[in-house]
Amino acid sequence: MIFIQFIKKMKPIILIFAVAAILFSSCKKPDYDKVFNDSGLYSRTVFELNTVVMGNNFSPPVASRNYAYASIAGYEVIVAGYPQKYKSLVGQLNGFTFVAKPMATGDIDYQYAALIAFCKVGEAVTFPEGSLKYYTDSLHQMALAHGMSKEMLGNSEDFAQLVAKSVMAWSKGDHYLQTRSASKFAVKDSAGRWIPTPPGYFEAVEPHWGEIRTMVMHDAKEYTVVPPPAFNVTDKNSQYYKEVMLSKNVVDSLTAEQTHIADFWDDNPQKMNVQGHLMFVTKKFSPPGHWMSVVGIGAEKVHADFATTVCAYAKTSIALFDGFIESWAAKFKYKTVRPETVIDKYFDKDWRPHLQTPPFPEYTCGHCTISAAAAEALTSVLGDHVAFTDTTELQFGIKSLSYKSFRDAANETAMSRFYGGIHFHNSCIVSRGFGQIIGDSVVKKLVMKR
């Protein structure tokens, strides 16, 4: 209560400073074009959405939906501002047939408008509108403080809103709302079939995500993977038995480096912690959130300009979105059991993986798939052999890791799920290849830069 009263007292002071900044700026030469033509500002805006997504406990597939539609809205604004350099995604993405055009008259700051459009769609795709209002209000005040005229400010915000409405109208046809009331996954404790795992024993996440409309793929089954090894825990010469033993032995003898890799790419948005009778959840960015962070790090590394950065986020988020749909379709086709369940039941009842097992079937590996897809998309925009240090996990107390390229990072991501004990080695390798195919398809089918 004391803290709330303190904040209330502070608001008039903050307002005074904001007004003073605007008045002071009127005496200076306007520099809003320099302020908003900053790719780092766009990345910080994506980070704001990332934080809101994390705070709302969205599952990885649902999170990918937020990022994709928001990023496409930002991109379409840039296309309108630079039609000679960038091509609209209208007619290239499934069902995307219309996007608003700029008004015939009136100046628009397209960088500012792209930021606003990203926020408007990002907050409205899944949450109630207003979750990013505090941030868009700060951008509005920043524009005024740096000399943007009220007329340009209004024109830019109006255009951003029109683009946001176009993208939102398109998003409503992706079958997401219908899946909210679809049937839950039927749990059947039969040999080799997925069942809930400790400590939360949560129901399967998004069993109907394969029914979501894809963006670039024809549908969720455009690309298929080979079936997983047949369930067999009695024949020591079977591939399945060898996979199970390999998982158990690796987790039982993890090196410090392997442990770090597993923790770094854990990306569990809702880790359930149990201490006696106390249960609490700790949050981190989900897998798509981690890769959205990598986009920003990569863009900064190569000194990408604003438009290129926006393009990188859009193409990567599309690859993430379609990657989840393809992977989830396979997951709920094969419905395979997790290593933890198999090892506990047949080999060691006290065995636990290093990472907490996510609540959905094992094959295919979602993180392996979407990471490989994202790496292909990101490489196509920012280039191959972009060495970078991934600092995403520092805020969660995990030391950074460095990579020779985006593909190098994706390859390590695949191994992280094996080290963590939540996926079989075969799943990681197959899924990584699956994701590369999806990412390559996104790259080949989309024409974004002219």
Image (cartoon, rainbow, N blue to C red):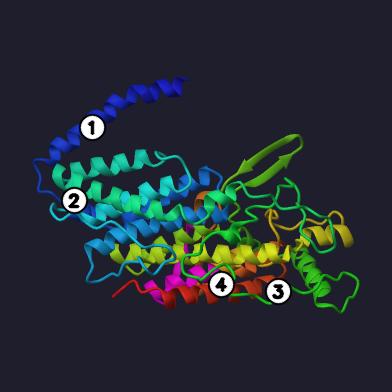
* Disc sitting over residue 17 in the figure: 1
Disc 2, SS:
helix
Q: Amino acid at mark 4?
A: Gly
| Horizontal relation, residue 311 to residue 395: left or right | left
As for residue 374 lying within the magenta part, the answer is yes
Amino acid type indicated by mark 2:
Tyr
Mark 2 Cα-neighbour bin, 10 Å: few <14, some 14–19, many ≥20: some
On residue 274, the disc is none
Q: Which residues are magenta?
A: 371-393
Q: Is residue 88 above or below residue 174?
A: below
Q: Earlier in the sequence, mark 3 or mark 1?
A: 1
Q: CA distance from mark 2 to mark 3?
A: 52 Å
Image check: 42 left or right of 57? left
| Tag 1: amino acid | Phe
Q: Which residue is mark 2?
A: 32
Disc 2/disc 4 C-alpha distance (Å): 40 Å
Q: Position of residue 5 (x, y in %)?
A: 40, 20
* Other residues around mark 4 within 10 Å, as few (<14) / some (14–19) / many (≥20): many
Residue 435 is labelled as 4
Q: Position of residue 339 (x, y in %)?
A: 77, 62
Front one among 298 and 83: 83
What residue is disc 3 on? 426
